[in-house]
Image: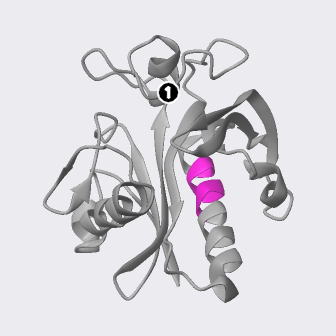
Amino acid sequence: MQATTLSFANFHQHGELFANIFRARKQSFIVQNKWDLPEVMDMEFDQYDTPQSRWIAVHHLGEVMAGVRLTPTTARCGIYTYMIRDAQLGLLDSIPQDLMFDQAPVAPHVWEVTRGFVAHNIPSTIRRKVHTRLVMEMVRAARVEGINQMVALLPSNWSRWAKRCALDMAPAGRVMDMGGINYQAVSLDFTAHLH
């Protein structure tokens, strides 16, 4: 099992892995969760998949087992910035505007985590290992990019696994039902991992 952080600068070095992340996202979010999201060529994508983002994949023999997208909170593309902030600004109908207790941050050292998934076909015997590998690669990416905080919109059961993964996480918003799944905005502090 490997973990790779992809960007527009390096995805050409990894064969089909970049496209496979978007195929795995389609399977997770459109097929399994039945979310109404854009798709083309069997891949799910949105307006936040720009050269400003990074994509982390946990993979084995070309199969993407898990993934996340990291986007700087300073990102801009047309009218869009990053998902949590744009929801707060009322640009996204699918996410409530009051998802965070405070104003969404905009700072070079703060990034957003979105589109996180572990593939549904991953056996329960290795799911924890896959999840841990994903978090370890997020920590590595935080060091490389100089990220000391991330914000995310996660399933509300995040507190059950945060300690197992040694992540310093705190609620940043209320629990919300989105598409039949309870989600909550959270803040992740990576300061201790930067040294």
Would residue 6 appear left or right of 129 to someone viewing this image? left
Residue 64 percent coordinates (x, y): 41, 74
Q: Could you tell me what secondary structure mostly forms the magenta stretch? A: helix
Asked whether 57 or 43 is in front, the reply is 43
* Residue 92 versus residue 185 in the image, above or below: above
Would residue 44 appear left or right of 147 to someone viewing this image? left
Residue 47 percent coordinates (x, y): 28, 34
Q: How many marks?
A: 1
Would residue 105 appear left or right of 91 to someone viewing this image? right
Residue 170 percent coordinates (x, y): 81, 36
Helix, strand or loop at label 1? It is loop
Residue at the spot 54% in from the left edge and 81% down from the top edge? 122
Residue extent of the magenta highlight: 137-143
Q: Quadrant of residue 113?
A: top right
Residue 166 appears in the figure:
no
Q: Quadrant of residue 131?
A: bottom right
Crowdedness of circle 1 by 10 Å Cα count: few (<14), some, many (20+)? some
Q: Which residue is mark 1?
A: 95
Residue at the spot 79% in from the left edge and 33% down from the top edge? 171
Asked whether 99 or 140 is in front, the reply is 99
**Magenta-drawn stretch contains 140:** yes
